[in-house]
Amino acid sequence: MTAVRSLTPGLEGAALAPMGRSGRGHRVILLLLMVLTASGIGAFIYQFSTGIGVTGMNDRVFWGIYTVDLVTLIGFSYGGALVSAILRLTNASWRGPISRLAEGTALATLAVGALFPLASDGHPERVWRLVTAMQINSPIMWDMVAIVTYLIATIVLFALPVVADLGRLQDAPGIEGWRRRWFRVGAFGWTGTADQHRVLNRSLTAIALLIIPLAVMVHTVLSYAFSLTSRPGWHSTIFGPYFVIAAIYSGVALVVVVIVVFRRAYHLERWIPERAIINLGYLMAALGVLYGYLLFTEVTTEGYVGAEATEKLLYALLLDRWSVLFWAFVIGGLVAPLLIIGFRRTRTVVGVTVAASLVTGALFIKRFLMFIPPLTEPLIGGEVGSYTPSWVEIVVTVGAVAAIPLLLVGLFKVVPVLAVVEMEEISRSRGEGL
Amino acid sequence: MTRFRKLVLLIGCFGLLMPTLVVSAQGQEPSPSIAISLEISSRPELADVIAARLTAPDGTPITEARIEFWITSNLFGERYAFVGASPTDSSGVARLPFVPHQDSYDVRVTFDGTELWSSAETIATIEFPSARVIRYQPTDPTQLGSLRFVMPRLMGIVVGMIWATLFALAFFTLRSFKRGGKADLT
Amino acid sequence: MTGVERDVRRRTTPLPLIPSESKDHVVSRRQFLGTLGATGAYFALGGGVLQRVLAAHDLDDIAAGRLKIAADHQWVMIFDLRRCDACRDCIKGCQEQHHLSADDEWIKVYELIGVQGKFAMPVLCMQCESAPCVRVCPVRATYHLPNGIVVVDQNVCIGCRMCMAACPYDVRVFNWEQQDVPEQYHHESPEFQVPQKRGTVSKCTLCVHLLEQGLFPACLQACTMEAIFVGDLVEDVMSNGRETYILSQYLRQNDAFRFRSELGTRPRVYYVSGHGQDLDF
């Protein structure tokens, strides 16, 4: 144990780097994030007391930006859990340095995203009735069950390796005072014995196996709130796979962005090699191709038959009112990232980061296009509807987006940002020193 | 009285009498009578028939006369619901197929009257045998309605098992951490 | 199961069923057959239960927890489109009765173009027997009354608007703001709610609070063209106040249809098609 420890003071320091005092630049950014998050909370309180009439929603477009936020954020969380789980199951050696950040991102986005149904409800204080009424036929009920289950699974997936790390790092330099007490308590008696390692690995493998179909289930269930209605543009069997693939795609993209930002901010370049980021870029590109296939299938199926209702919607999306947004999504979210990662010249950390940022933004647009345009189309007759998010919705959205890095920073002030135990185990199994 | 005044008086009396003559001539149109009866169909798939026989006061049937059938309803106050109309045949019987939805109906049969006959109407209560009454049944549920019932409950069981697995994993893992274990790593 | 049975026949010694760490790895034949029998009985019993469950009837109301079919009336509404002239008096009548704002339309009048030309079609809540809105409400705030009418309990509704997404007829409206209605008109019940509560969903109730008193719905009373009828499936009678017909006969003789019934909603509103030919429309 001591022999290993003396080899890796650099790793320990790196894993605990975010827990040190933040520099001035960091503090400014954190302050900004805190202000944005606080404004978001304030705007929600205003909405709660005044009524959701303050949003831009109306009887025609009755679900708006909040629904887009919900699906986008929960989609992001899938990427983190999946990156961690799949890389573990395939025993990818480069998973070590990124798994903690990936799982943390999953947790943070899920925690914030799960609040958005409350933001969209007219009476969020009555949400407890979901449990007492037990309306098993309702997609909203399924959403609640699925999200809570997924949250528990993500917490367990995140927490178990953290327990090991807390045990491993409790005597590291720099850990004193309340942190030391917290590390000791949170370690649950981890001392790094072979038995404990075996138990940890078996449990993590089990959770990884469990969380993959669970995440598929969660996102499919999320899609059912739309596809289990008879509305043109929503009532499509492709919505299940659509949501799942979009979630992984955008989730991996966000993980890339988070990793790159933390890597730069806390000088973890030595521990998170470029290779890991490029590999994630490959994964992202593959998922982009898959998503493009789903999009092509959906458009072709609806467009060929030309049923009146879907024809009008498709025309509006591809050629009319929504075409700017639609083609921006296709180029920015599917074509450009693929090109960036496809060509060696652009396949760098910077390139992958740019591609990932494009994907993140483009998939937000795509979800907007999936939910709002079908609502604007009249079901029976009358005028086409319209929707403009109000300042309340925008502030709440921005606040939620700001809350995620804030949560991550806060999280990694109490939890090591690198999965030290896992990294050491990987290098040990490969026979190399750290 | 002068001859002229006699003429005026005669015309005046005649003039006064004319309407009375006309009226009494009208009032002298014979009033037919209507007898209502129920003809139950021999076959269950055929409707029962309400029959109305229109006869002259001397008993001869009145043919090709339009008979209207009404039933009373208490929906939104007392009112008559128009069921249908049919002409009388050579034996003076008008027939209307009718499907009963309750045991008895107050049936009102009317004849509007023609130049020959004055109008007539009859009200009678018709009792239908229980077996002939078609009561309201809710329409068949969707074929796959049971799927909507079973699937969510099945998924609920799956979710329950997932929760049990997650909590068991967390609990047992942490417990075995606490127990420590054999052998050091080096 | 069959694989294990086959194994048992081939082997001479009993098969260990449960991999246990105890010294006794072997399960006796009697124990094994007993388990087999118990499992078989379980499946038979479970199968029986499953069969009963699969044969269950109208499950939307089971889902809503209110399966009661026996009621004095089962209300339907009939629109005679030959008479409708798109005057929208029905909308005004409804808004007056329920103290709604001018923007809240529980009954909407669409002017559509068909093969025969332009025609007007009033659409209100179809009171579907297989209502998608009842099915998807997560808190059971919307449910069927025994007489077939669907109502919303605005003290339970959380305002998630899933019912609005599920309704194929676009008849539900959401109360984005709180309405101001003088105190004297206030009435609290899902059958007749005044005023509508902010943050909840509202829709036409076929004026069930009037129907049960033997009065006509507000839209019917307001319609100057006498194009709206109310009927009762139990008594098989329909009326618009002046004309009263046998419901099933009228529907059959006038080729009445239901709107979008192919979606499986089993709506309770009938239309007699026309293009205002009873008027100069």
Image (cartoon, coloured by chain):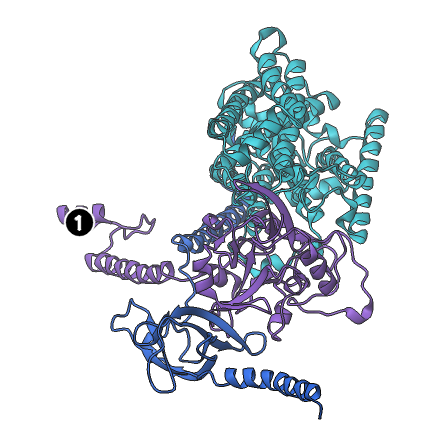
Q: Is residue C229 above or below residue A147?
A: below
Q: Residue at x 67, y 25 (%)?
A: A325
Say which quarter of the image contains residue A365: top right
Q: Is residue B109 above or below residue C155?
A: below
Of A409 and B109, the residue lying toward us = B109
Q: Can residue C99 be spotted in the picture?
A: yes
* Residue A75 placement (x, y as % from top left): 60, 35
Q: Say few, some or many: other residues with alpha carbon within 10 Å of mark 1 (under 14 / 14 to 19 / 20 or more).
A: some
Secondary element type, mark 1: helix
Report the chain shown in purple.
C
Say which quarter of the image contains residue A171: top right
- State the quadrant of the N terminus of chain A: top right
Of C235 and A177, the residue lying toward us = C235
Of B42 and A415, the residue lying toward us = B42
* Residue C190 placement (x, y as % from top left): 65, 66
Q: Which chain is disc 1 placed on?
A: C
Report the chain shown in blue.
B
Say which quarter of the image contains residue A392: top right
Q: Can residue A165 be spotted in the picture?
A: no
Q: In the image as oriented, which residue stretches furthest toward the top?
A: A345
Q: Residue at x 64, y 84 (%)?
A: B11
* Residue C197 placement (x, y as % from top left): 73, 60
* Amino acid at circle 1: Val
Where does label 1 land, which residue?
C8
Q: Is residue A109 above or below residue A362?
A: below
- State the quadrant of the C terminus of chain A: top right
- C53 lies left or right of A161: left
Q: In the image as oriented, which residue stretches furthest toward the bottom?
A: B1
Report the chain shown in cyan.
A
Of A164 and A400, the residue lying toward us = A400
Q: Is residue A405 above or below residue B19?
A: above
